[in-house]
Amino acid sequence: MSYSSEARQKAEMMIRAAEALMFRRRRLCSLAPRCPHCRVTNVQLVESAPLARWKCRACKHRWTYEPIIMEKRNAISSDRQDVVLD
Ligand SMILES: [Zn+2]
């Protein structure tokens, strides 16, 4: 069985997108914040895109916290800031 180059390109793009999302989730989890409400570290990532949403397992507070994430491939920007929205 052979794939057309277009179909293969599409499949490779999907795999790269899935890998990028997995990488992002892993990075987010390794940068998990404290709960801004009760300060515990027992928090859960509930959404990873477009912005990271977190939920505190202790007080159930939910908030958006987008840490700086180094891109997988070389692009490291120094002007991005952590974004915290309650
Ligand atoms: Zn909390």
Image: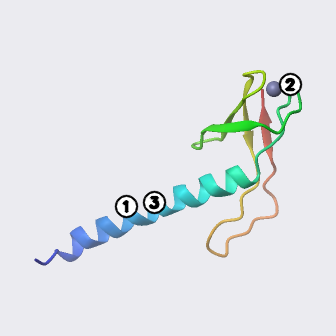
- Name which residue lies at 78% across and 21% down: 59
Q: Determine whether, in the image, residue 23 is placed left or right of residue 19.
A: right
Circle 2: is it few (<14), some (14-19), or many (20+) Cα within 10 Å? some
Disc on the earlier residue, 2 or 3: 3
Disc on the earlier residue, 2 or 1: 1
28 to 17, vertically: above or below: above
- Report the amino acid beneath label 1: Met
Q: Quadrant of ligand 1?
A: top right
Q: Determine whether, in the image, residue 58 is placed left or right of residue 19.
A: right
Residue beneath disc 2: 37
- Report the amino acid beneath label 3: Ala
Q: Determine whether, in the image, residue 34 is placed left or right of residue 13.
A: right
Residue beneath disc 3: 17
Residue 26 % position (x, y):
63, 56
Quarter holding residue 61:
top right
Work out which residue is located at the far right of the displayed protein and give it: 39
